[in-house]
Image: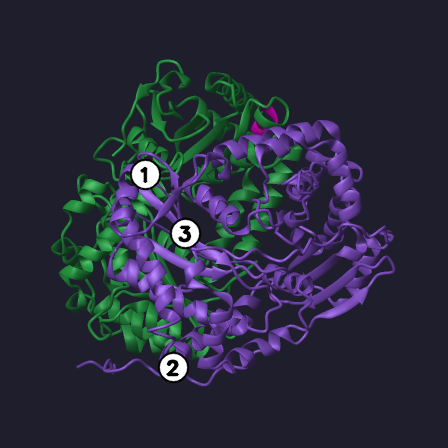
Amino acid sequence: MDIPYTTHTLANGLDVVVHEDRHIPMAAVSVWYHVGSRHEQPGRTGFAHLFEHLMFKGSAHHPAGYFEALQEAGGLVNGSTNTDRTNYWEVVPSQSLELALWMESDRMGHLLPALSEEKFTTEREVVLNERRQNYENRPYGLSSVALAEALFAPDHPYSWVTIGAPADLVASSVDDAREFFRRFYHPSNASIAIAGDVDTDATLALVERYFGEIASGPAVVHPRRDAALAAPARLVLEDRVELPRLSLAWHTPAMFHDDDAAMDIAADVLSNGKTSRLYRALVYETRLAADVSALQASREMSSVFHISATAAPGQSLAAIAEVVERTLDDLAATGPTTDELERATARAEAQFVYRVQTIGGFGGKSDQLNAYNVFTGSPGFIHADRARYARATAASVAAAVRRWLREAPGVALSVVPRGHLPLGLPGAVPVHPA
Amino acid sequence: MSRVDRSKLPAPGAPRPFRFPTIERAQLAGGLDVRVITQRAAPIVSLTALVRGGSSADPADRPGLAAFTADLLDDGAGTLDGPGLADVLARIGAEADIEVWPDATVVTITTLARHVSRAASLLADLVMRPRLATDDIERVRGLRLDRLRQMRAQAASLADRALTRAIFGRHPYGHPGIGDPDAVRATTADDIRGFHAHGYQARATTLVVAGDLDTAEAIALAEAAFGAWVPGPMNGAGPRVVGAPEGRGRVLVVARPGASQSELRVGQVSAARSTPDYHALILWNAVLGGQFVSRLNLNLRQEKGYTYGVRSGFDFRRDRGPFSIHTSVQTTATADATSEILREVRDLQSTRPVTPEELARAKAAVGLGYPRGFETAQQVARAVAQMSLHDIGPDHFEQFVPRLNAVTLDDVAAAAARHVRPDRLTAVVVGDPATVEPQLTARGLAYDVAAEELV
C-alpha cells in the first residue's frame, strides 16, 4: 500500500501535499490547522471547537455561509476538532477544485472582517446544543469528561474534553475568537492536502495563487506535557442508564511510538471479536457483561488505553473488574499467542488498505497524508507506521502491557443508574464532571 | 497587491465524464441471482448477500425474529463455531457485517482481494449453513434483552420507536427490527430454524460481488461457494405487503423527566421505492431538510440556534415507507421547534413552494455529487443490492442524473402533494414533561402522552 504524493512548502510556511487518483471525477481538499483543545487554557475550554464552527459562517469576500456555495457545486464539506488538531475538508467534482481552494484560502486569510457578534452568539447556542445532545442527554455521555478530569491534573491540556465545559462556552466572547484566529489560523500552522482527479502541477500552481499571498503568523508553541498518575483512582458517576458500566483507563505512549502499536495490538487481543480474551471471559462464556471493548486512543502528547464493560443485569462491576485484572495479568506475563498475534497483525495490515479507499472526507487519503505530515513532518510516514506493527512481538506486547497497565496506576470509573451509588466498585468516590 | 480575484467565486470548469460501473449478471441453477461489478481502484472485494424478507417478514406474534436469526449467523456456520469464524475472518483481514432492513437481511464480507475465495465460502456458510445451536440461541437471547433494556435510556431510540409505532401501527413496518422483550423471550429455537429454512432461499437471494476481480472469476467463485444451493419451497419469503395506514395529525409526548434536550421526530407513512415520483421527492426533500443548506436547518440551526442539526428524509421501501424529520433541540425551544417544523412543511406545499432557484440548486447538489457514491467496492455492492431488492432496471446509474434533471417545479409540487400530507404528520417529543407540556399548550399544540407500551 502506497500513496504517491508531491509535496511543497510555500514561502509563508504552508505545507502542500498533492496525490493523484483519477478513479472518480472528484477532488478532495483537506486543510489541517495544528491547533486543538490542548492549546486552550483551563477555564476557557471548548474554544477550538467553537471556533471551527465559526469558520463555516463566512469570510471577508464570501460573508454568507460556506455550505451553500460548495453544496451547490455538488460538494460535501465538513470539519472536526480534537485535542491536537482541527481539520476542514471538501470533496467536490474535480471541475470545482478551484472553488474549494478559493474558499479555504479566503477563510485562512480573511476570516475576521466577516465575523460578527451575532454569528458568534448563534453558533455558541448550536455548540451548547451539540454538547447537551452528545453528552448530557446520552447514556454514559459524561464518562469521557469524568475520565479526562481523573487522568490529568487540572492544568494539563488533556484534562478537559474538546467540546468544552458549558460554563466556559457561555463565558466566551467574539473577541476571544479574533485573538484565537490571529494566534493559530495562519499558513505556517497549517497543511493542505489535495487528493483525487487533479493534475499535480496545476494544483500546486492554484495553491500558490490562492494561499501564497496570505501572511505568515506568529510561531505557535505546542504544549508538551507528560502524563502520569500518582496513584490509582476509583470513582463513581450517576447517570441516566439502565446497566452499570465499568470504564478503566491508563496513560500510554503517544501516537506513532512503538508501544502505541503494541497497545493497539493488545486491544485487539483483548476485545476484538469472539476470539478475544475479554469478550470470551466476560460475554461469551460467562455472561457477566453485556459488552466489552478495549481501545488504544492515540494522541500527540500521550495516549490513553481504555477498557470498558457494561454489566449484564444482576452482575456486579466488582466481578467484572476481577476478570479484567486476571486477564491483564495473563497477557502481561506471556503476551499474545502466535494465533492472536497473527490475527491482530493481519487485521492491522488490512486496516491500512481499507483506510485509504477514499480520497477524502472524514478519513481517506488526503486526511491520512495530512495526519502524517502534521504529526511526523513526513506525508510518507505510512511505511514507518506499518513497520511498527510488523515489529511487534509477543514479548514486546507483553512488556508494554506490563509497563503501562500493570506497573502504572489507572483510573476505574463506575457509571451507575441514578440513586444506585452502591452498584459502583467498593470505595469509589462520587464525581460530578463539568 | 492581491493577485487573486476575490470579487466573485470561480466558475466551475467543464464536468469530467464518468463511466458508471457495468453490472454483469448470471443466475445459478439453484436460482441465485448473481451480479458482478469490476472495480480496480483498490485491492479489495466486497461480497454482499441480500436475502429478501427482513423485519417486515416477522410473524405478527414474533417481532424481532428476522433480526434474532440474523444475529446468530456468525455464531457458528459450516464446520466452524463462532470463535472459529472470527478467527478466519481476522486472518483474511475481513470485515463481516450483518444488517436487517425492513425488507431484507443483508450479509456483507469485505476482504483483501487475495483472500476472496475464502471470503466467498465463508459468506456461503453464514447464509446457507448457520448452526443455530441451542446454547448460542440462549446466549444471544440474553444479549438482545440487555440491548433492549439499554435502549430504554436512549432518547433517540425511544423517539424512533415511538414514531414508527405511531404511524405504522400493526403494519409489518410498525415494529423495530429488534422486536420487544416479550417476543425475544418467547422466540423458540424452532421459530429461528424455521425462519431460516423457509426464508433463506437461493431464489430469494442476490449475491453481489464488487471490486478487484473480473466477471468470470466472480461467477466461478459464486458457483464454487453457492452452487450447491438448491431451490427450496418458496413460502413466506418476501415482505407481507398489506398497504400502509393513513395517519392523523397529532403530537405525542414521551416522558423523560429532567431530560436536558428534547428529541423530536415528525413523520408519516409516505412513498414506496417504486413510486414514479422518486426523483421528484429526492429534490423536494433536499429543499426541505435533506442536506445542510435546507429550509429546516437554515431556520432551526443557522438562524435560531435551537439545535445542532435537523434532517428530513424518505425511507423508500418495497411497501410505502416513512417520511420523517429528525432533530434534538434545546428543552426551552421544544414547542417552537415543533411548530416551526410543521409550518415549514405546510408552507412548502402552500404559500412558499419550491422556487426555481431552489430546484436548480437541489439538482446541482444531488446530481453533480452523484459519482461520489461509486468510490469504494462496498458502496457499489450496496447500491447494486438495493437495485435488486427494488427491481430497479440496469440503466439506473446512467439515468439517475438525467431523470433528476428532467424534474419540473410542477412535478415536485405534485409529488409532494401525493406523498406528504401536512395535516397528517405525527410529531413525537421525547423530553422533560414539566418543561415541554406547558410550552405545547401555550403554542396551541394539543398532545397525547404516550402510553408505556408504545415505547
| Same chain, labels 1 and 2 | yes
Q: Position of residue B420 (x, y in %)?
A: 47, 65
Q: Quadrant of the N terminus of chain A?
A: bottom right
Which span of residues is magenta-colored? A275-281
Q: Is residue A269 left or right of residue B311?
A: right
Identify which amino acid the numbered label 2 is placed on: Pro
Asked whether residue A4 is in view, the answer is: yes
* Label 1 element class: helix
Q: Main secondary structure of the magenta part?
A: helix
Position of residue B87 relative to residue A186, above or below, is: above
Crowd tier of the residue under label 1, counting other residues whose Cα lies within 10 Å: few below 14, some 14–19, many 20 or above: many
SS label for mark 2: helix
Asked whether A118 falls inside the magenta stretch, the response is no
The chain assigned the colour green in the figure is A
Q: Which residue is mark 3?
A: B250
Q: Nearer the N terminus, badge 1 or badge 3?
A: 3
Residue holding disc 2:
B356
Quarter of the rendering containing residue B81: top right
Label 3 – label 2 distance at C-alpha: 32 Å
Picture layout, residue A302 above or below residue A371: above
Amino acid residing under circle 3: Arg
Percent across and percent down for residue B188 are 72, 31
Q: Earlier in the sequence, mark 1 or mark 2?
A: 2
Between residue B285 and residue B345, name the one nearer to us: B345
In the image, B300: left or right of B211?
Answer: left
Examine the rendered structure and indicate whether residue B323 appears above or below residue A278. below
Chain shaded purple = B
